[in-house]
């Protein structure tokens, strides 16, 4: 018997990315549980269980074509020149900080600097990152260069990408996304099963 999203949540495998909601036709919604984590909750409507599980980064029975991160990297990181069996494929690794954002950031300001440069150089048209709003935190879309500076600092708090795929079909252009590894994998799985999303050319 194949696992359902409910099974994955019950076994502690859900990290709250929210990607499953984008395939559920409104039947799954991200809600806070009693432990303070965001999880998908079934509202009783019918939905395609198999489609939702296929996008989960912790699907216990993935298709062979996307069976693990190494296989996914062959598809999405074709231009990488280096490989390490502990971290996978990559172009290079760096350490550093931003002179401009270091004093207002948690970890040197590199992410804020990169976000700003992505917009200035027109590498992406939007940035999808976490922002505080009246004491709560959530992912939000930005395309204003000056606003990027207001979201400096790392947020170690549960968030979900549920809103991204409610908005994405109304957006033209490329999107840069800040996310933990499992969130990024979820988006890659979404692109795999929806090739039209290649046009969005997500950057991480």
Image (cartoon, rainbow, N blue to C red):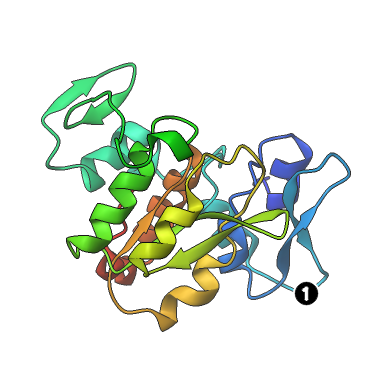
Q: Can residue 100 be seen in this view?
A: yes
Q: Where is residue 145 in the image (x, y as percent from the top left)?
A: 34, 64
Q: Where is residue 37 in the image (x, y as percent from the top left)?
A: 75, 44
Residue at point 62% right, 64% down? 21
Q: Name the residue under label 1.
A: 45
Q: Position of residue 159 (x, y in %)?
A: 63, 50
Horizontal arrangement in the rendering, residue 98 relative to residue 41 (left or right): left
- Whether 118 is drawn above or below 154: the answer is below
- Whether 81 is drawn above or below 87: the answer is below
Horizontal arrangement in the rendering, residue 43 relative to residue 160 (left or right): right
Quick one: which residue is furthest to the bottom in this view? Answer: 170
Residue at point 68% right, 51% down? 5
Q: Which of 148 and 85 is in front in this view?
A: 148
Q: Position of residue 185 (x, y in %)?
A: 43, 44
- Whether 44 is drawn above or below 152: the answer is below
- Answer with the quarter of the image where residue 123 lies: bottom left
Residue at point 49% right, 46% down? 183
Q: Which secondary structure, mark 1?
A: loop
């Amino acid at each position: 018997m194949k696992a359902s999203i409910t099974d994955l949540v019950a076994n502690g495998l859900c990290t709250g990315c929210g990607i499953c909601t984008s395939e559920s036709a409104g039947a799954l919604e991200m809600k806070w549980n009693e432990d303070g984590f965001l999880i998908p909750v079934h509202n009783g409507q019918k939905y395609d269980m198999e489609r939702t599980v296929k996008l989960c980064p912790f699907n216990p029975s993935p298709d062979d074509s996307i069976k693990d991160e190494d296989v996914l990297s062959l598809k999405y990181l074709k231009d990488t020149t280096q490989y390490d069996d502990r971290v996978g494929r990559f172009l290079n690794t760096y350490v550093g900080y931003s002179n401009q954002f270091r004093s207002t950031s948690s970890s040197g300001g590199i992410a804020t600097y990169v976000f700003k440069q992505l917009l200035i150089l027109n590498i992406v048209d939007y940035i999808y990152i976490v922002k505080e709003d009246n004491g709560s935190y959530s992912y939000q879309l930005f395309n204003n260069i000056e606003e990027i500076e207001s979201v400096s600092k790392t947020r170690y708090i549960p968030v979900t990408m549920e809103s991204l795929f409610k908005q994405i079909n109304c957006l033209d252009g490329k999107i840069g996304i800040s996310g933990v590894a499992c969130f990024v994998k979820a988006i890659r799985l979404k692109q795999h099963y929806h090739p039209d999303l290649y046009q969005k050319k997500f950057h991480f």
